[in-house]
Amino acid sequence: AAGLAEFVPLIFWLHVVTPLAWIVLAIAQSLYLAALGAGLALLVGRLPGWQVWSACAWVGEELIRSRWPLGGFGWGRLAFSQADTPFTSYAAIAGAPLVTFAVALCAAFLATAVIAATDAVRTPAAGPTPATGRRTHGWATAATFALAALVVPLVASLIPRPTDGRSIQVAAVQGNVAHPGKHFLGRAEQVLDNHLAETAKLVADIKSGVLPQPQIVLWPENASDVDPLHDASVFAKIQAATEAVNAPILVGAVLDAGPDHVTNTGIVWSPSSGPGQSYTKRHLVPFGEYIPWRGFVSHLTKLTSLVPQNFLPGHTPGALDIGPTRIADVMCFEVAFDDAVRSGVTNGGRIIVVQTNNATYMGTAETKQQLAMSQLRAVEHSRSVVVASTSGISAVIAPDGHVVTRTGELTPAIIDLPVVERSQLTIADHLGAAPEWTLGILGGLAVIAALAIPLVAGRSARRPKESSPADDR
């Protein structure tokens, strides 16, 4: 019930594609929380310090759900509810998993306080509590755990969020789309023409002194809906735009990759040398960018026609040299995956760039949810994050997680601002996925131990007592 209450509204935006996908995915995600709920019920009252073990179990559930099946689905993690709160600071120590742990631990402390207070009201004298089976001191226990719940975010507020560093001028171009929804691409080159037109406005504003000269320009995911490496006219248009703006452009493009396959790629396009380094999206959206078991699924639904060609995944981190800096490039859905962002940063990325295309989900909460994830990533890696979207929300996020500026949806827009770049890695960057696996495994072991306790107790109760001479007499 709790899982459905979370995921049915959380991913309501998926109904734009098909209500069936929305309901099926919501139910599938809810099953993970059902399993977690069973584990938490075992932990409460059977293990000392169950509050800590239950928080570990939350991390373990998210670890599995974000990886399996089909690469996982990271939406709905507790960490992503903390876009910019005191809890967010824990991300700089051990990433999103520690934020989840802290939120779950705080909730467990509050639950214990409520249980103890309820017990104190019902039984003024000290007695065993329903939750722990141990004697408590009623109001004293309630006050202690309520204070402990307050300490968790207070400790996080002591963790610094540095924002210093050299600034570079960055422009993000949001060209907009003519047909939001499932068929946002419209006719060929329409999305490309929108971004070319908005880039031309940027050039005009630079020449008139309205906007400063950017050092790098960012286009969003799918900004070129025609492969510029195979279409000479598209190549020429992008090259001309790059030369006009006099700065390299990160071009999001759909590239041909052989029969029936394409890639979702960001290309660094230089005004002097043309296309150079590139990053291809690694975490693809199942049933959105490729159809698993296409032959079988196509017999069940005609919706496979919405993805006529499977995208192929990339295999290298998105660390790209562009102009005077090096960026950590991630594509849209990838911002929900810890490793996709972290690998770009640990390979030298000094600014995180999220190229995204939310045109299918305009007017829903999806784009705001993605922005919240980007805010957490800024703190996790102590990096500025620039979100470049086809149709909104594009934004600049400071390394401390606060949104410096953001655009509206379904409107052409330009952001041209100084953005801080940072090179120092956070503790979370150094530790990588180790904290997540450690906490998750501890949570799993705790559940196993809680399962074993009644079995051991039952065997002990059934074991015959050894007779003694006194018994014989």
Image: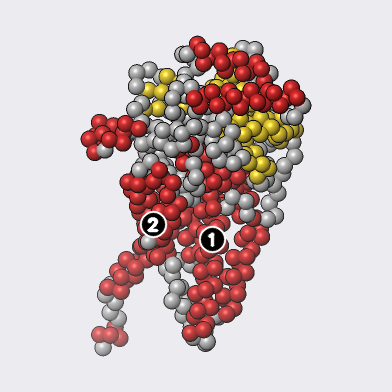
Percent coordinates x, y for residue 344 in the rendering: 57, 32
Looking at the image, the residue that sits furthest to the left is 299
x 60%, y 66%: residue: 148
In the figure, is residue 197 to the left or right of 462? Answer: right
Q: Where residue 105 is drawn, which disc sits there?
A: 1
> The disc labelled 2 sits on which kind of residue?
Leu
Q: Is residue 380 above or below residue 216?
A: below
| Circle 2 residue | 4
How many numbered marks, from 0 up?
2
Whole-percent x and y of residue 446?
43, 59
305 left or right, relative to 123: left
Residue 17 placement: quadrant: top left
Residue 334 visible, this angle: no
The residue under label 1 is which amino acid type? Answer: Leu
Crowd band around label 1 with a 10 angstrom C-alpha radius: few (<14), some (14–19), many (20+): many
Q: Position of residue 127 (x, y in %)?
A: 48, 83
Q: Reading the chain from its start, which is encountered first: label 1 or label 2?
A: 2
Q: CA distance from mark 1 to mark 2?
A: 22 Å
Confirm or deny contact between disc 1 and disc 2 (CB under 8 A). no
| Residue sitting nearer the eye, 463 or 456 | 456
Mark 2 element type: helix
